[in-house]
Image: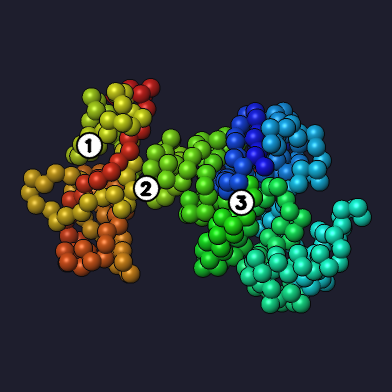
């Protein structure tokens, strides 16, 4: 089922939780709603589900206005961060629950329920836990059972609100890969709320970046990562160094350094205050030699474990700190020492120009 929300507004008292939000969620795709705490992700999800009503705007399911349809008629399945399974019921009975409470005319036979629950438990790879009770499961197992329970009623939309939020980092990583595979098998239109950018970029077909009740950007993961529409998106999607300065005629002057403003960027042709955004792995690092081009820095601290070395650098001209990442192999070959003077050059940068600010 495709979902469309149109001009959704929602206030809680004076507080604007959603500000004229319009979005498309294509049929069969997994969309991540990504943004900082309080930006309105859960409110939007609840409005799509029918658990919350917008002050204005529409929710269309398969191009049909569902704004006044009851939760039950919307055929959505939910998984929440703390989805309380029924503690006194076995895993099997938890998954069977949605089928047993169907109106008599739609309720499957006991045999059909058994077969269906068995299939679902196999799908989430936990059939061996059918007779256990929820307190006897790990957090990750509980969330997989919660997903099986949501899928039992064959929802046309799956809404997941931080489903792995309460789990530790390693289990989270495993489960998001697992969710992606499951989605590839089932192709249920799914919306996944998260404030973890890595999770959103890895799992989703489409990422919606939200900030203070507004949609900042929507696009495929590589598109939002490589072509962020705003400084907020750039900063939210990963660590970033900011070099503040002034842009004139395509050159950003920042401290003693200057950078060519890439032609295709938002700032094309504009003059004004500007900031270059550079990811730590997009910096090229060399030992300083007189006359070398780039930003002269001191190596304050290096942390080299596994394939990467992380470097804390301090700009010689402005004393600002710069974070850089390079391969551990290159770091070892260069034999860099803390306190040494180096020079860094951005291999890739993004410049946002505030044309309104005077030079
Ligand atoms: P988080 O990641 O912390 O869950 P979120 O992006 O999902 O955040 P929402 O839960 O949608 O954010 O909340 C958006 C804003 O609306 C928050 O500031 C929240 O305090 C407020 N809010 C949500 N529900 C209510 C309510 N029922 N009454 C008053 N304010 C509310």
Q: Secondary structure at mark 1?
A: strand
Q: What is the C-alpha distance between the residues marked 3 and 2?
A: 35 Å
Label 1: few (<14), some (14–19) or many (≥20) C-alpha neighbours in 10 Å? many
Q: Quadrant of the N terminus?
A: top right
Is label 1's Cβ within 8 Å of ligand 1? Answer: no
Label 2: few (<14), some (14–19) or many (≥20) C-alpha neighbours in 10 Å? some
Q: Secondary structure at mark 3?
A: loop
- Which residue was labeled with disc 1? 259
- Which residue was labeled with disc 3? 187
Q: Secondary structure at mark 2?
A: loop
- Residue 65 visible from this viewpoint: yes
Residue 283 image point, x, y percent: 26, 50
- Which residue was labeled with disc 2? 240
Task: Give the quarter of the image for residue 45.
Answer: top right
Q: What is the C-alpha distance between the residues marked 3 and 1?
A: 45 Å
Is label 3's Cβ within 8 Å of ligand 1? Answer: no
- Residue 87 visible from this viewpoint: no
Q: Nearer the viewer, mark 3 or mark 1?
A: 3
Residue sitting at x 53%, y 50%:
204
Residue sitting at x 63%, y 47%:
189
- Looking at the image, residue 237 sits to the left or right of residue 208; the answer is left
């Amino acid at each position: 089922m495709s979902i469309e929300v149109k001009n959704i507004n929602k206030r809680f008292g004076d507080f604007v939780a959603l500000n004229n939000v319009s979005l498309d969620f294509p049929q069969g795709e997994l969309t991540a709603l990504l943004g900082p705490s309080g930006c309105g992700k859960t409110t939007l999800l609840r409005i799509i589900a029918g658990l919350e009503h917008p002050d204005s705007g529409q929710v269309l399911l398969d191009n049909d206005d569902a704004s006044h349809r009851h939760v039950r008629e919307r055929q959505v399945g939910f998984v929440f961060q703390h989805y309380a399974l029924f503690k006194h019921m076995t895993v099997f009975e938890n998954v069977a629950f949605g089928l047993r409470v169907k109106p008599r005319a739609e309720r499957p036979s006991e045999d059909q329920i058994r077969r269906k629950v068995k299939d679902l438990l196999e799908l989430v790879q936990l059939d061996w836990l059918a007779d256990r009770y929820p307190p006897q499961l790990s957090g990750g197992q509980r969330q997989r059972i919660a997903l099986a329970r949501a899928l039992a009623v064959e929802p046309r939309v799956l809404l997941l609100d931080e489903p792995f939020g309460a789990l530790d980092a390693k289990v989270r990583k495993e489960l998001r890969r697992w969710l992606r595979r499951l989605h590839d098998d089932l192709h249920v239109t799914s919306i996944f709320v998260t404030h973890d950018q890595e999770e959103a970029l890895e799992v989703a077909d489409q990422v919606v970046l939200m900030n203070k009740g507004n949609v900042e950007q929507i696009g495929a993961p590589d598109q939002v990562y490589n072509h962020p529409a705003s400084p907020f998106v750039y900063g939210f999607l990963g660590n970033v160094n900011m070099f503040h300065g002034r842009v004139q005629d395509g050159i950003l002057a920042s401290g003693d350094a200057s950078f060519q403003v890439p032609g295709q960027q938002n700032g094309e042709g504009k003059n004004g205050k500007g900031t270059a955004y550079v990811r730590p792995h997009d910096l090229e690092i060399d030992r300083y030699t007189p006359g070398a081009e780039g930003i002269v820095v001191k190596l304050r601290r290096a942390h080299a474990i596994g394939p990467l070395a992380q470097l804390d650098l301090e700009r010689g001209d402005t004393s600002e700190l710069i974070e850089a990442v390079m391969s551990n192999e290159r770091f070892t070959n260069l034999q860099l020492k803390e306190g040494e003077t180096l020079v860094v050059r951005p291999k890739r940068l993004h410049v946002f120009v505030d044309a309104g600010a005077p030079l």
